[in-house]
Image (cartoon, rainbow, N blue to C red):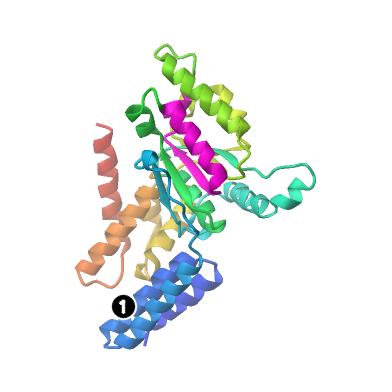
Amino acid sequence: MATAEQIKSLIHSHFSEQPERFYTLALQVAAYEAKQGHAALAHDIREIIDIEKKKSTPCIIPFSQDLNGLVLTEASKVYMSSLVIPDALKERIQLVVHEYRQQEKLRSHGLSHRRKLLLIGPPGTGKTMTARVLSRELNLPLNTIQVDRLVTKFMGETSAKLRQIFDFMHQMHGIYLFDEFDAIGGERSMDNDVGEMRRVLNAFLQFIEQDTSGSIIIAATNNPKLLDHALFRRFDDVLYYEPPEKKERKQLIANVLGVFKDSKFIWKAVLSDSEGLSHSEIDLACRDAIKSTILSDISKVSATLLRKTIKNRLEVRKGLRG
């Protein structure tokens, strides 16, 4: 049967409302049982997981053919518990969820739920994950608009494509994420601006102001200084993201390592080495450490090993900066 450590981790993830981690641990139990020769039990566990996951999958209607490649649609499985950010920021995201679920009550008083969000922060700090969390929590499909491709591939047609996307919001309620938003949201007074991009931005401002679809619209950017000031007042809320502090780094590492974390794990040096890294960089370092233990037939991730993979991520960052 499953190890005592696996059973304890399963119970903990269930009562701490971490369904995604619960699924991962359950699959680890299935793999363990299969290895012990209990193939039927392993199959039953996987089948139960598949059935439960399908219950929460939202209906997805495909976009028209001419928007293929510009809009990526997915049914997110990322839970709120996976979002490791400051409590104050998480509360504001939970407020979006609460208002969406109570939108009829708000509407009866002449009010609308907050659904137009501007997310600002460095790469890998949780902006895209926030969109995925909202998708899962509200059981809505996540539609990611590739803004940079929209601008470069369809110069001259961008406004028309934007109109198609906003029209689709009325047909299919969902989460609509405009990633790399500064590609169209740049300040209109910039010297290097061109007439076409001014028209695109003006069109977006008009579309988002007039939109009454009920869908949640999210614009994400790494460069807020490039955004036109007129954009900010079109959004119901502006959320700022930063690299994780010590408390968040510890929680993130513990979440990702799960049962692979050494019981004698030494936190001080790891938390010091990881300072300044983004959520995604820490996540990747943890997964690199887990893979290393598996391939080396080691059962647990030590602080020494994780510090090594963190150092590798720091080297990657250094190389990207040139």
Identify the residue shown where x is 67% and y is 45%: 113
38 with respect to 191 (left or right) = left
Majority SS type along the magenta span: helix
State the residue lying farthest toward the right. Answer: 109
Q: How far from the left and from the top, in percent, is residue 250? A: 45, 57
Q: How far from the left and from the top, in percent, is residue 286? A: 33, 58
* Tally of numbered discs: 1
Query: Badge 1 local density, few (<14 within 10 Å), some, or many (20+)?
Result: some
- Along the line of sight, the residue nearer the viewer: 322 or 173: 173
Residue type at numbered disc 1: Ala
* Residue 119 visible in rendering: no
Q: Which residues are magenta?
A: 158-186
Identify the residue shown where x is 52% and y is 37%: 166
State the residue lying farthest toward the top. Answer: 191
Identify the residue shown where x is 36% and y is 78%: 29
| Residue at numbered disc 1 | 31
Identify the residue shown where x is 55% and y is 72%: 15
Is residue 12 highlighted in magenta?
no
Examine the rendered structure and indicate whether residue 44 appears above or below residue 155.
Answer: below
* Residue 237 visible in rendering: yes
Q: Quadrant of residue 262?
A: bottom left
Is residue 183 highlighted in magenta?
yes
Examine the rendered structure and indicate whether residue 60 appears above or below residue 277.
Answer: below
Q: Secondary structure at mark 1?
A: helix
State the residue lying farthest toward the left. Answer: 296
